[in-house]
Amino acid sequence: MPHTILHIDSSPLGERSVSRKLTAKVQAELRAKYPDSKVITRDLGVHPLPHLSGNVIGAFFTQPDKRDSALTEAIKLSEQAVDELVGADVIIIGTPMWNFGIPSSLKAWIDHIVRAGRTFKYGATGPESLLPSGKKVIIVSSRGGVYSDGPMKMMDYQETYLKAVLGFIGLHDVSFIRAEGVAMGEGAAKNAMQSAETQLVETVKKVA
Ligand SMILES: Cc1cc2nc3c(=O)[nH]c(=O)nc-3n(C[C@H](O)[C@H](O)[C@H](O)COP(=O)(O)O)c2cc1C
């Protein structure tokens, strides 16, 4: 089945970025498996979305037919980001770990796509997703240290946060590929890369 792939990167480090090297490999594996796939790229490392302004939030809470031209303009970037998400079958997200969490560029994207009335609503029993079901999310996370096990595990606010916020809008099928210990010496960095490459091949194999 052909897929629309939404490829999001958030590292600003260009060719030096570990997460970008790995998301490129995820995309290449997916395209080898589904050659007819269409890829949409959102490069938050190069073109970050602005932080939410008062105008944008005002537009979020104004019905589309009541928005004047200023509010329509203010909400444009958010609408585009949500449309990309709605249209995607597979979403690849590359994220460096920054100060135990995600970079603010990725957080700004999240603030633009978690939208009452577009990606979720509050129903009688609590929040309900408005995204079409069946989407797969593959998150590539690159870290200087090791968090999947050991004393730093409790400092990993990246995975818990991403799982929670993506689940909130109905993205429950989320896989993590971790490159861990990339700042712990040459050998550790090489092992981290090899391990992440194995993880990504296995993850893409499971994409239906
Ligand atoms: C601003 C900044 C904050 C960072 N914070 C952490 C951190 O909290 N924990 C960690 O293990 N590594 C941290 N690192 C190291 C990065 O996670 C690591 O270099 C990773 O490879 C970055 O991803 P990238 O190469 O795709 O940019 C930090 C790096 C930077 C530049």
Image: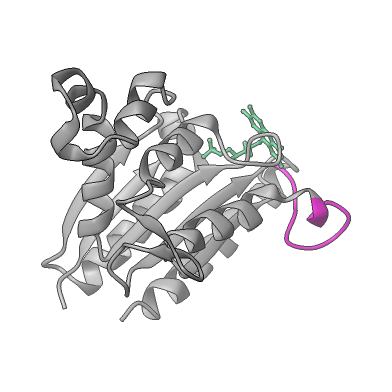
Residue at 26% x, 66% y: name it.
Answer: 89
Ligand 1 falls in quadrant: top right
The residue nearer to you, when weighing 205 against 53, is 53
Residue 2: percent from left, percent from top: 15, 72
Q: Residue furthest right?
A: 151
Is residue 48 visible in the rendered image? The answer is: no
Task: Decide which of 15, 160 is in the foreground and name it.
Answer: 160
> Going by the image, does 15 lie left or right of 208?
right
- The reply to whether residue 96 is in sight is yes
**Left or right of 130 on screen, residue 14:** right
The count of marks equals 0
The answer to whether residue 43 is above or below residue 40 is above
The quarter of the image holding the N terminus is: bottom left
Span shown in magenta: 144-154
Where residue 115 sits in the image (x, y, percent)?
37, 46
* Image quadrant in which the C terminus is located: bottom left
